[in-house]
Image: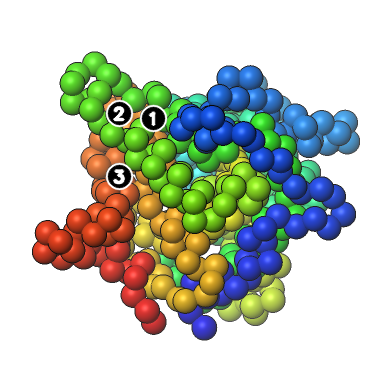
Amino acid sequence: MTSHEILTKNLTTIAQPVKKGRDHCIKSTRLRNARSECGLSQLSDSPSFLSQHTSTLSDRRTMKHIPLRCMSEQGEASALAIMIAFDPEWKSGSFSVKRLSELNNMNTLLKLERKASGRFVSEGEKETVLLRAYGAATEICMDPNLEARIPDLVAQHDLASPPLACFENGLLHRFTQSRVCTARDLGVESVWRAVAAKLGRAHTLLPSHGTKARNIWTVLQQLVDALPTDTMSATATKISLGNELHKAHAELRQSYGELDAKSVLGHCDLSSVNIIVPECQDVLQHELDRGINFIGYEFAMLCSASFDIANHLSEWAGFECDYTLLPTRATEALMDEVDAYRAIPGLLWGLHALYRTKNEHLGFDWASYAEIRLEEFWAWRREVDGSRASSGQGIPLREQRWAQEE
């Protein structure tokens, strides 16, 4: 059975929100125009999803807050200051920092280890923490407070270990005998089977009711609204992308009905660096299913389960957009809907990259990355409207992989 088949087969039961033990129905909103079609007229005064569903969690558990920021330019000193504020014992003993990932100043992941001085300790005795710091210019797509406000909710369903503490721009997680996935790991059968199982559980168990929660379409519209209009070219780009956003939404709604009614609380950023797996490579499948963890819920929002799956599959290409790593297509019924969403991740992350171009000083060419991701969307559009075939052009590699039968 193909990777697409396993991912979609495990999620078939959650294509519609479940209604077991609580109401997961989302009342349909009357849509008067293209903007309100996406639920955008409610945006300015929409209450947070979590204010409706996690108010009691803060009564049960107050996460330790550290009033410091992790500054990547300060290196180990910044991370050590946070750890000492978390636990003064980190002042003593040996201390090491391993940089696991720095996604071009989007997020930084550090593995911090401490062992008591003066004696030998085994790997299991080392105190190991994962420090995750959020980058700049992420206020539209990323809510840095979100993950810190739902730790009990995701931990309650064994979807993630509760963070140890939060600081001004990130979180501390337990990190015992585990490692962060790579893009190539996602194509390993044991890993994608475990991801599929956990993602299916997340879509089924995490509450998704509440029509005024932010959703994928409101975030996309916010990103379009934030595009500059200082030149004629920029204005034309903004108008074009805005029109395409409404067109794509209308097409999906026409094919699959009211999108709000099928919403789940999606992870929406399930890239390799947000998947933690056991360090040992030879664990049995059921042990991996149990040991795998997701982090990075600060991007979580209401979306179709099919979008969340399509977005994860897009992440198989990694940040370098190596489309040869993408899984190929299967013919499951749900796969048709996942396939219909295949262009939306490129639109989301392309718009996000355009938004971040105002922070070019961070040392990454966001404009070029935006061009690559938005081309994923345009390639899809040319494929579905037939303009690519009529012009005699070849099929782009990403479209080839999505269409290829195994």
Q: Which residue is mark 1?
A: 224
For mark 2, what is the residue?
Answer: 238
Left or right of 160? Residue 348 is left
How far apart are labels 3 and 2 at the CA level? 13 Å
Which residue occupies the extreme top position in the image? 230
Amino acid at pointer 1: Val
x and y, in percent, of residue 357 in the image: 30, 29
- Residue 44, percent across and down? 58, 19
Amino acid type of the residue that numbered disc 3 sits on in the rendered structure: Leu
Name the colouring of the figure.
rainbow
Please, what is the three-letter code of the amino acid marked with disc 2? Lys
Location of residue 395 with respect to 69 vertically, above or below: below
Q: Residues within 10 Å of mark 3 (few under 14, many from 20)?
A: many
Tell me if residue 123 comes above or below residue 107 in the rendering. Answer: below
Residue 43 image offset from top left, x and y in percent:
57, 25
At x 63%, y 68%, the residue is 12
Cβ–Cβ below 8 Å for labels 2 and 1? yes
Does the residue at mark 1 contact the one at mark 3 (Cβ under 8 Å)? no
> Mark 1, residues whose alpha carbon is within 10 Å: few (<14), some, or many (≥20)?
many
The earlier-in-sequence mark between 3 and 2 is 2
Mark 3 = which residue?
374
Compute the Cα span from label 2 to label 1.
Answer: 6 Å
Q: How many marks?
A: 3
Please name the residue shown 42% across and 30% down the image: 223
Residue 54 visible, this orientation:
yes
Quadrant in which the C terminus is drawn: bottom left
Element on which disc 2 rests: helix
